[in-house]
Image: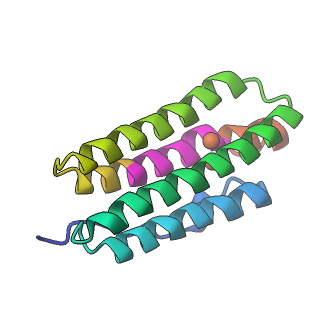
């Protein structure tokens, strides 16, 4: 199988300026890279299923922390933001089921995680620091 799975490389431009959240985002990147390394392009099906659970669990934990920071800041877009988080977890869970059923969705899962995370951080999460600090925009 060709190796088309790209790593996620953390970069300052992904930082939103809220330290705790940035640290957790960096971990979400690292978790993904460990997932890719440990699954050998879906060669290890058990590692893929276990890895998706770890990715989901860490993400769920991060989302809860982020939502509490947003709640404390009276962030006005909290509700749609929570829905975005829920959609991500639901999608990941659906893809894990498809993988378990033997569908060739490994690369789709990797691409989805990578793309969703970068878009969500740079567009949706960034709105928190814009709201709190009036930064960027
Ligand atoms: Fe978020
Ligand atoms: Fe986030």
Q: Quadrant of the N terminus?
A: bottom left
Is 71 magenta? The answer is: no
Q: Is residue 2 above or below residue 62?
A: below
Along the horizontal axis of the image, is 83 left or right of 45? right
Residue at (78, 35) in percent of width and height:
131
| 51 sits to left or right of 1 | right
Q: Position of residue 108 (x, y in %)?
A: 26, 50
- What segment carries the magenta color? 113-126
In this rendering, the count of numbered labels is: 0
- Residue 33: x, y in percent? 43, 71
Image vertical order of residue 106 relative to residue 31, above or below: above
Q: How is the image coloured?
A: rainbow
Q: Nearer the viewer, residue 103 or 137?
A: 103
Is residue 73 something that shows in the picture?
A: no
Magenta segment, principal secondary structure?
helix
Give the quarter of the figure containing the C terminus.
top right
Residue displayed at 74% across by 38% down: 67
Does residue 40 appear anywhere in the picture? yes
Give left or right: position of 86 versus 2: right
* Residue 126, quarter of picture: top right
Residue 133 pos. (x, y %): 83, 43
| Residue drawn at (55%, 68%) of the image | 11
Residue 127 falls left or right of residue 20 = left
Q: Does residue 124 show up magenta in the picture? A: yes
- The residue that appears at 45% across and 73% down in the rendered structure is 34
Q: Residue furthest right?
A: 72
**Above or below: residue 12 compared with residue 97:** below
């Amino acid at each position: 199988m060709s190796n088309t799975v790209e790593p996620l490389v953390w970069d300052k431009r992904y930082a939103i300026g809220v330290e705790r959240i940035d640290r957790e985002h960096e971990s979400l990147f690292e978790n993904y890279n460990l997932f890719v390394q440990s699954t050998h392009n879906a060669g290890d099906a058990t590692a893929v299923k276990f890895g998706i659970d770890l990715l989901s669990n860490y993400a769920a934990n991060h989302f809860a922390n982020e939502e509490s920071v947003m709640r404390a800041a009276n962030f006005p877009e909290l509700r749609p933001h929570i829905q975005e988080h829920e959609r991500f977890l639901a999608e990941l869970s659906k893809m894990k089921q498809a993988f378990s059923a033997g569908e060739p969705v490994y690369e789709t899962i990797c691409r989805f995680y990578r793309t969703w995370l970068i878009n969500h951080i740079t567009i949706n999460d960034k709105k928190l620091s814009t709201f709190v600090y009036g930064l960027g925009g």
